[in-house]
Image: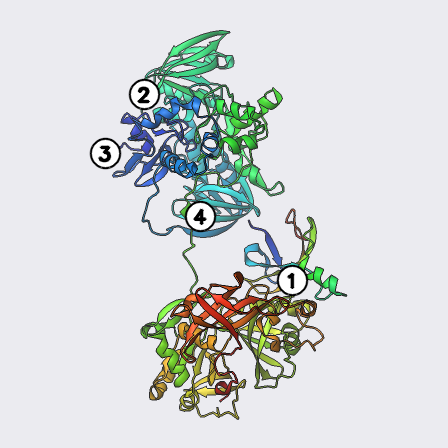
Amino acid sequence: MRPGSLRFEGREIPIQDGDTVASAMFRAGVRTFSRSLKSRRRRGLYCGTGECPNCMVTVDGVPGVRSCVTDAAAGMRVERGRGWPSAEHDLLHVTDLMHPLMPVGFYMKTFVRPRFAWPLAERVIRRATGSGRLPEGRDPSRFTARHVHVDAAVVGAGGAGLAAALEAARAGDRVLLCDAFPIGSRMPPGPALDGIRALEAEVQAERAIEIVDRHAALGVYDGPTLALASDDELVQVHAGRVVLATGATETHEAFPGNDLPGVWLGRAASQMAGLHGVHPGRRVVVVASTEEGLDHLRTLVGAGVDVVAAVVPSAFLDDVPPTAEAIADGELISASGGGRGRVRSVTLRERGEQRRIPCDALVLSTGLAPRDELARMASPDEPVELVGDAALGDGVAPGVSGGYVCLCEDVSAHDLEQAWSEGFRSAEILKRYTTATMGPCRGAMCGRALAAFAARRSEGRDRAAAPRTAARPPVRPVALEALAASVHEVIEKRTSLHDTHLAAGARLGWSSGWKRPFAYGDWREEYAAVRERAGLMDVGTLGKILIAGRDAATLVDRVFPGRVADLAPGRSRYVLALYEAGYVADDGILGALGDGTFFLTSTSGGAERMDARLREWTFRLGLHVHLLDRTSELGAIVVAGPDARDLLGSLSDDAIDAAALPHGGLREITVAGVPCTALRTGFVGELAFELHHPRSGGPRLWAELIRAGERVDARPFGMDALELLRLEKGHPYIGQDTLPDDTPAKLGLDRAVDMGKSWFVGRAALERLARGPVGRRLVGLSFEGGPADAAELRGMPVGAGGEIVGRVTSAGRSPALVRSIGLAWVRTRDGELPAALTAGDATASVVPTPFYDPEGARLRG
Amino acid sequence: MTLRIPCPNCGERPHTEFAFGGEARLHEAPDDEADFARVFLPDNDPGSARERWFHALGCRTWFELTRDATTNRIG
């Protein structure tokens, strides 16, 4: 015996060896396991296989746990979810008595008018329904995700699944065998379990079979791919073929009283008696029309349960143990309840005569409903097959004579009749209207009953293979956090200077997949250092692509709209990249290294797309080009400011004067012993050097620059200072200041386009667009009034004459100009920009960009 | 979920490694109208079509293949 007990609603319930939470509760006398969703009817143990919603309880704060398939453990806290004040005494049970007043679609029909009533009604209804409270304050998903590749995936480790796995492995396949539960659990001892154990031993010995138990299969997708979830991981199985040995559930029949506590499916009852040694009732009636049902009957009788009557087909009469009265071909009419809603009697029709048998439990084994949902959701041509009971096909359709068709959503046969009379006349729309099959069992119990109802009503005849509602994943309930597995595992891109920045106390933040310093202290001081002395910035995040090979010059000439053919070695130029639609995709700096080789820097985060773009056009134009994305192997540091040359000169013996390395120039130099490709760029609007260097040399280069910079009080600067530095120069960030359909003309970047070229990507579109007016322009704005920190204007609509004509995309207070400036797109009318613009409470006037140093004297220095 | 794409370098790989590059079309058209259609009006026909794919999370090769958009059958 396993020591211990679980804590159930304030009292201790002892646990015995092999107990599930449900068996321990049942042994302790619990009969009402839950209250139904709407009518608050008492629900007791029913399916015993983890399908129906009846046994759902809250375990250790987690709601929706199926107690019949959850092993009991000492110290568990178990509560029933619904019920006010408790599941045992639920005052909201009055809704069941009001059922005639609350037809199907009640909520939608009743509270729609007046309109204000619905939010109020919804709050009340919300409080009254639901299956428990979500745990609060839990950590982000603990789930991990993994992929498995196998030749064959077998779902279900019962007899058929074990045999299928063995067969596949012996034929040379790598096999994954999964089951929602441990192999052979939930089976009472007997020859069936012995057979499973024997097969299991063979499977365990087979090295080509990976057994993944306690993993529920949620869905089959194209591939075929199988999604499995356990309580700590999500597995995607990519399989050559999928074998579904998911077995069958026992048929859920809808008859008056079918949802009373005390009505059991055979498996649940025989488990309770045979496995846990608890009698499902004192006087039990068994209805068994399958071989399996006879087994359950024997198990019950063998466990000493008092079976007062067994209703069987006449062929089975001889198999009924003598202690029970055998009733041949009896027809089950109804079950009636007594106090606390439990079964008190069963009414049968025997040879035309109705007969009432007093009992306190009714055990049903009337047929098998194959679990075929996974197969039904697979594409028809996928290698997905059903074996074993899952392949039985549609047998006898379940009866729908009353009671509850859908236990999860509390949809009765009467509700379906009513919906039918309102004109909802197929399984699919009955489902949508009544929500039948939409509960936690995912239609496993009720799907066939709903289909049978629709078939009978529409055609007046029984059809086992009635059209069923579409099967969709997940076929088993799954926690949302399982589906969120690994979302917190993000790849954080870091430059070689990451630790250096941290040590310097930098505030790091996300920027297009990278962690970058936004400021080291007060960004205004960093800004001032760049404008007045010198600043250092880690721009290792820039895309850095080497373009070489016979057709490299042709490729860059075709991909970039500007003139690049005349680019002399040692020179660089601003380039745009366009889509074929003529819209601006990205920008960068293209430098010529000589020998027809080019070095391209692109925006941080745009490197992969730029590389993809270059590769695409290499392929489409049939060129011979070698592309090497060096983004991750090169670091880059910008040294910018009036003192930048002095600073760099103190660490390098190479010529870096204006003649040797002018603005736009590019050359190889050595700085502090680190070989660098130096580019004279001008993003911040000052004399600036961009030093591209081997990543390993980054920390040393940075440290030497910082040390040498002490003389002029140089500072490292981050994204915050850069934002204003580039804004003062009027440089748009592609993506932040632009819209997806911005053309070079809209952005004022016509200088980066040479329409004299015969062909480049997007040229035909630009030519077409040039025939019409430019409908919108990105312009520089100067603000009067408005907030002290103009950054608050970012995102504001731009107004003119009471209309919205644009939007502010960047804004800030310029220390250099001592005024508020910004970039904004503004709609034109007849090609003209409107006058008298406003943004928030500021007035705005269009001014030419760059705002700062318009002639560029400082950056050319 | 897992459409498998035959990469000319790497063989058959899950589609999640690839980027779809659109219908394979020429990079220019005889006149303006045809160019507009070339850029903005994909055929989107059910059935087989020539497509461009990019092995983005693999060898970064572009290639063309023929895929049936209704069945995902390739070739």
Q: Label 4 is placed on what type of residue?
A: Leu
Q: Say which residue label 1 marks.
A: B63
The chain letter under disc 1 is B
Disc 1 and disc 4: Cα gap in Å? 33 Å
Name the secondary structure under disc 1.
Answer: strand
Disc 2 and disc 1: Cα gap in Å? 70 Å
Disc 4 and disc 2: Cα gap in Å? 39 Å
Name the secondary structure under disc 2.
Answer: helix
Disc 2 and disc 3: Cα gap in Å? 21 Å
Q: Earlier in the sequence, mark 4 or mark 2?
A: 2
Q: Which numbered marker is on residue A10?
A: 3
Q: Are marks 1 and 4 on the same chain?
A: no
Q: Say which residue label 2 marks.
A: A340
Name the secondary structure under disc 3.
Answer: loop
Q: Are marks 1 and 3 on the same chain?
A: no
The chain letter under disc 2 is A
> Going by the picture, which residue comes out furthest to the right?
B30
Q: Nearer the viewer, residue A431 or A216?
A: A431
Indicate whether A752 appears above or below A371.
below
Q: Say which residue label 4 marks.
A: A483
Position of A96 with respect to A374 (left or right) is: left
Q: Label 1 is placed on what type of residue?
A: Phe
